[in-house]
Amino acid sequence: EVQLVESGGALVQPGGSLRLSCATSGLTFNSYWMGWVRQAPGKGLEWVASLNPDASEKYFVDSVKDRFAISRDNMKNSLYLRMNSLRAEDTALYYCMTETGYWGQGTLVTVSS
Amino acid sequence: QAVVTQEPSLTVSPGGTVTLTCGSSTGAVTSGHYPYWIQQKPGQAPRTLFYRATNKHSWTPARFSGSLLGGRAALTLSGAQPEDEADYYCLLSYSNSGVFGGGTKLTVL
C-alpha cells in the first residue's frame, strides 16, 4: 500500500522559515517525479513545486521562486520543501503528491503574527 | 503561465450522466499535458481518479471515465451517485511544471 505522510507544518511569523517533509512507503520512490501542492483555506488546489527522480530538474510556481527549495532523499524515500521568507499568502494545507497521483493527508502552514 | 479552465459548477441527477471538461489557454489539451482528474470531498484530502488522461487507480469507480475530447481533457460520470458530489480538479503539465484548473463543483441533485 502506498502511503505519503507530510509533517513539519506550524504557525510561523511573516518572514520566518519552515521545512516540510513527506515520508513515503510502498512505492519505488526513486523512479518518480514528486511534487508539492497547496490549498489555502476555502480555495482551490495550487501546484507549488516539482522535482524529477534524480533531483536534477526542479520547477516552482512563480510566487515561490527564490523563496522555496525542493529536495529529496532517495535513500530515505522522502521529499522536502524548505520555505523561506514566508508570507501570509503562503498560509495553506500543503500536500505532497506523486507523479502517479498518490496524495498525503497534508500538513498545515499558518503564517501570522 | 498557462491558464487551465473548468466549468465552475455542474449539476447532475442521480443516475444521470455528466461530462466535466478541462481546457488550456495554450491550445488543445493533448496526452503530452499528462492530464490528471482529482476529486476532493469537503474536509478530505484530494484523491486522484485519473492520471495521464486515462490511467485509473484501483479506487476509481467504474462509472468514471477519462478521455481527450475535442481539444480538451474530459471526465465523464455515467450513473451518478450521491457520493459523487464533490469538487473535481484538472491538473495539466507544462514542461514538467503543473497548473490546476479552478475546479468544478459537482452537485448530484
Image: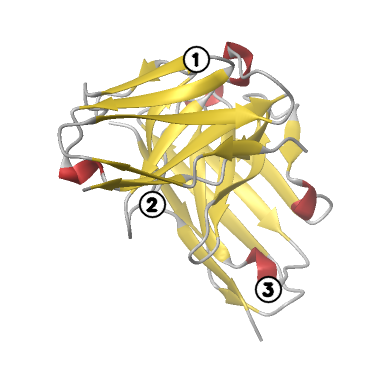
Is B92 situated left or right of A76 in this image? right
Whether residue A62 can be seen here: yes
Viewer-proximal residue, A102 or A6? A102
Dot 3: within a 10 Å radius of its alpha carbon, few (fewer than 14), some, or many (20 or more) residues?
some
Quadrant where the N terminus of chain A lies?
top left
The dot on residue A105 is 2
Dot 2 lies on which element? loop
Q: Earlier in the sequence, mark 3 or mark 2?
A: 3
Task: Tell me the residue at 71%/21% (across/down).
Answer: B27
Which one is closest to the eye, mark 3 or mark 2? Answer: 3
The dot on residue B69 is 1
**Colour convention of the picture:** secondary structure
Task: Tell me the residue at 19%/44% (across/down).
Answer: B83
Quadrant of residue B20 within the rendered picture:
top left
The dot on residue A21 is none
Distance between the alpha carbons at the discs numbered 1 and 2: 32 Å
Amino acid type shown at disc 2:
Gln
Task: Tell me the residue at 72%/73% (across/down).
Answer: A16
Amino acid type shown at disc 3:
Ala
Is B65 situated left or right of A74 in this image? left
Whether residue A76 can be seen here: no
Spot occupied by residue A58 in the image (x, y as percentages of width and height): 74, 34
Dot 2: within a 10 Å radius of its alpha carbon, few (fewer than 14), some, or many (20 or more) residues?
some
Q: Which residue is mark 3?
A: A88
Amino acid type shown at disc 1:
Leu
Spot occupied by residue A21 in the image (x, y as percentages of width and height): 54, 51
- Whether discs 1 and 2 lie on one chain: the answer is no
Spot occupied by residue A67 in the image (x, y as percentages of width and height): 79, 57
